[in-house]
Amino acid sequence: MTNGAILDSVETAVKWASNMTWKGIKPIVNLVTTTYETGVKVLADALKPYKVFWQRSENLPKWDITIVPY
């Protein structure tokens, strides 16, 4: 949801995303300009230290994850 903002360029979209807040917390927004290869998977052991910060949605647990940094 953009609250009516016109996201007519990448620069505008990045700036808009950088200025939003959720529950009083601002996101860290970086534009990724490299191309990612398809089919690359992260091993479960590599994800393990990060999963403790994940809170999965009850309704969409596969797609909706909140990352709580503390």
Image (cartoon, helix red, strand yellow):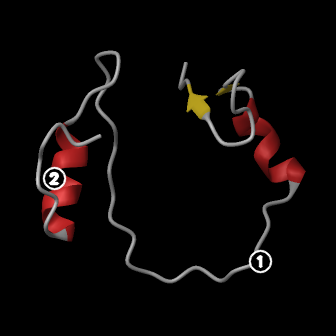
Q: How many marks?
A: 2
Q: Quadrant of the C terminus?
A: top right
Secondary structure at badge 1 equals loop
How busy is the neighbourhood of tag 2: few (under 14 within 10 Å), some, or many (20 plus)? some
Residue depicted at x 73% and y 32%:
61
Q: Are marks 2 and 1 in contact (CB under 8 Å)?
A: no
- Judging by the rendered image, the residue that carries numbered circle 2 is 15
Tell me if residue 61 comes above or below residue 34 in the rendering: above
Q: State the image coordinates of residue 69 (x, y, percent, origin top left).
A: 53, 26
Asked where in the image residue 40 lies, by quadrant, the reply is bottom right
Three-letter amino acid code at the position of disc 1:
Gly
Residue depicted at x 33% and y 37%:
27
Q: State the image coordinates of residue 25 (x, y, percent, origin top left).
A: 32, 23
How busy is the neighbourhood of tag 1: few (under 14 within 10 Å), some, or many (20 plus)? few
Disc sitting over residue 39 in the figure? 1
Secondary structure at badge 2 equals helix
